[in-house]
């Protein structure tokens, strides 16, 4: 699924094939250094870092962050951001959004439920592309702040070698 929001684009697609590298055992980490490497190598793919039950997912396209999320209260974070950034969102849309979010979570979708929710809101014309870009930015800031403080965990990088059209 590729949605072009003009200057801000989101690309989260299931990969047809990928190579995976990382560490299964917990190790000392330097998240800022890891991000710098991903950027300088212009990596495209899914970077996942886990600490206990909590996991962060960063989706990158040629070293640029396309979307960031984590497993800590994902829907609540999205709902809070929507209320703060887009107060005029129709309440019926919020109910439908929750249903779609829960369904995607239960199915274990390859694309994160919060990303799917943002795409759905744009498709339903409840969010403009500019609002979606602002929302993606605000979510990334909120997700990356605690990410940068991680000192130990394990990570995996699934690099895309061919994306679905």
Image (cartoon, grey):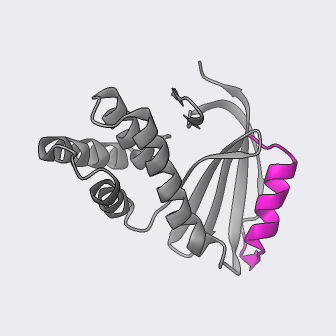
Q: Is residue 92 left or right of residue 56?
A: left
The quarter of the picture where residue 124 lies is: top left
Residue occupying image coordinates x 76% and y 77%: 27
Q: Is residue 68 above or below residue 120?
A: below
Residue 143 placement (x, y as % from top left): 53, 64
Q: Is residue 87 left or right of residue 37?
A: left
Tell me what residue is drawn at x 48 percent, y 57 percent. Answer: 138
Identity of the residue drawn at 80% across and 52% down? 38
Q: Magenta stretch?
A: 25-44
Please say whether residue 51 is visible from this viewpoint: no
Residue 55, compared with residue 17, is above or below; it is below
Q: Position of residue 84 (x, y in %)?
A: 31, 60
Residue at point 76%, 64% (across, down): 23
Judged left or right of residue 82, residue 57 is: right
Horizontally, is 128 left or right of 15 in the view? left
Task: Report the front residue among 104 and 32.
Answer: 32
């Amino acid at each position: 699924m590729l949605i072009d929001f003009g200057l801000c684009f989101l690309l989260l697609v299931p990969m047809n094939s990928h190579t995976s590298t990382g560490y299964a055992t917990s190790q000392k980490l330097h998240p800022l250094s890891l991000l710098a490497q991903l950027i300088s190598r212009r990596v495209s793919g899914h970077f996942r870092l886990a600490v206990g039950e909590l996991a962060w997912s960063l989706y990158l396209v040629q070293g640029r962050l396309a979307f960031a999320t984590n497993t800590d209260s994902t829907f609540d974070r999205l709902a809070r951001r929507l209320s703060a950034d887009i107060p005029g969102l129709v309440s019926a849309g919020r109910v439908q959004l929750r249903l779609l979010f829960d369904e995607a979570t239960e199915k274990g979708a390859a694309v994160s439920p919060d990303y799917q929710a943002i795409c759905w809101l744009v498709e339903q014309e409840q969010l403009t592309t500019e609002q979606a870009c602002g929302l993606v930015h605000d979510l990334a800031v909120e997700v990356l702040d605690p990410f940068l403080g991680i000192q130990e965990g394990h990570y995996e990088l699934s690099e895309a070698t061919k994306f679905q059209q």
